[in-house]
Amino acid sequence: MKTISSFQKLVYEATKKIPRGRVSTYFQIAKYIGNEKACRAVGNALNKNPFAPKVPCHRVVSSSGSLSGYAFGKEKKITLLKKEGVMVINNKVEDFKNKLFKIKE
């Protein structure tokens, strides 16, 4: 197993807080871990997530509700989200505002 950085560990711990049937954003995770400007770094950490699906990186989307990359492909991300009751239409989470989970301590 590869060694994960302390930053990755923070990202993975935050991501585990997102409940089934909800989504959060790269920005929300970056904000939660104390660096609002680290959205892209959060995405990079999630792209290397060795703990999927225990760390549910498929539940992380852009701040507009659009799906972004997923290491196993966008279709797989859509399938996983739909299984959890999160519908995706035209590459966006349907009813995004109600599906959005803001990570708090």
Image (tube, rainbow, N blue to C red):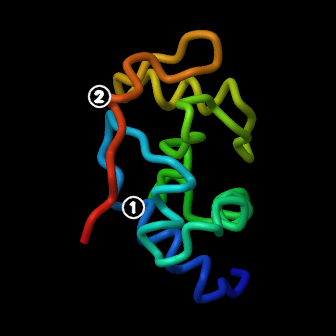
The residue under the point 61% across, 77% down is 8
The tally of labels here is 2
Taking depth in this image into account, of 28 and 4 the one nearest to the observer is 28
Which numbered disc flags the more N-terminal residue, 1 or 2?
1
SS assignment at label 2: helix
Which numbered disc, 1 or 2, marks the residue closer to the eye?
A: 2
Where does residue 40 sit, x and y in percent of width and height? 72, 60
Q: Which residue is mark 2?
A: 98
Q: Residue furthest front?
A: 37
Q: Which residue is mark 1?
A: 16
Up-down relation of residue 76 to residue 88 (above or below):
below
The quarter of the picture where the C terminus appears is bottom left
Image quadrant in which you'd find residue 73: top right
Up-down relation of residue 83 to residue 10 (above or below):
above
Q: Residue furthest left?
A: 105
Image quadrant in which you'd find residue 22: top left
The residue under the point 30% across, 47% down is 19
Taking depth in this image into account, of 47 and 67 the one nearest to the observer is 67
